[in-house]
Structure formats: structure tokens, C-alpha cells
Amino acid sequence: MIRRGPTGRARPRPNGATHLALRRRSGRVFCWRERGEVDFVVHHDGHFLPVQVCWDGPAERHHRALEDFYERFPQAEEVVFATAEGFEEEVARVGRW
């Protein structure tokens, strides 16, 4: 489920530096939530790229949320984990996508 505002249009989930960096590089950024949550989903040319923010590395809850996401969107691109250590490089990868 993509979070929608009062007008029914999808709206981005504000989440600081990661959200701003993704918006600058790709434009269409959303949150996905069902049983778990993928922090950001970048939509470009009909493709979806999940981005999980996990400063200390991915935890089990991140992997569970991604399993649910890939069940719903099996053709989605490989996840990007935005960590404190590799933030700039990982977010730049989204811009090259």
C-alpha cells in the first residue's frame, strides 16, 4: 500500500536527509507499508526500487518487510540499504538507476 494524502494522491514520507537526497535524484519517492514497511520506494519508468534506511545495517524486520514487498512487486529492483557508513555512495546509486 502506498501512503495517500487527503486528495487520494500518493504522498512522499518525509524522513530527513534520505528523503531529500532521493527526491533530488529521482523525483518520485513513496513509502510502502503492509505487514512491514519499506522506508522509501523510488518509482522510475515503471520500475520500483526499494530503499531501506538502517544506519547500523539491516535488521530482521527490514528483511521481513522486503520479503513482503517482493511478494507484491516481484519485478522490483534490488534493494538499496542506506547506512551511516555508505550513505553517499548508496544514495548516489539511486541517481544512476
Image: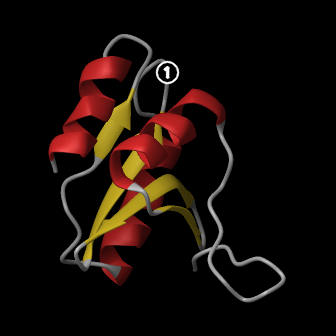
For residue 78, which quarter of the picture?
A: bottom left
Category of crowding for the residue at label 1, using alpha-carbon neighbours closer than 10 angstroms: few (below 14), some (14–19), many (at least 20): few
Task: Identify the residue at horizontal 60%, vertical 70% (top origin).
Answer: 35
Number of numbered callouts drawn: 1
Image quadrant where one finds the N terminus: bottom right
- For this orientation, the residue located farthest to the bottom is 8
Placement of 83 over or under 70, stated as above or below: above
Indicate the position of residue 60 as horizontal and vertical percent values.
Answer: 46, 42
Q: Which of the two residues, 83 or 67, is positioned nearer the viewer here?
A: 83
Q: In this view, does 47 lie to the left or right of 35?
A: left
Q: Which of the two residues, 31 or 27, is positioned nearer the viewer here?
A: 27
Q: What residue is disc 1 on?
A: 55
Q: In this view, does 31 lie to the left or right of 71?
A: right
- For this orientation, the residue located farthest to the right is 6
Question: Colour scheme used in the picture?
Answer: secondary structure
Determine the secondary structure under disc 1: loop
For residue 85, which quarter of the picture?
A: top left
Indicate the position of residue 12 as horizontal and vertical percent values.
Answer: 62, 60
Task: Identify the residue at horizontal 72%, vertical 89% (top origin).
Answer: 8
Indicate the position of residue 63 as horizontal and vertical percent values.
Answer: 39, 49
Q: Is residue 82 left or right of residue 92?
A: right
Give the amino acid type for the residue marked by disc 1 in the picture: Trp
Task: Identify the residue at horizontal 36%, vertical 56% (top origin).
Answer: 50
Indicate the position of residue 53 as horizontal and vertical percent values.
Answer: 49, 35
Placement of 54 over or under 65, stated as above or below: above
Task: Identify the residue at horizontal 34%, vertical 36% (top origin).
Answer: 81
- For this orientation, the residue located farthest to the top is 85
Placement of 95 over or under 83, stated as above or below: below
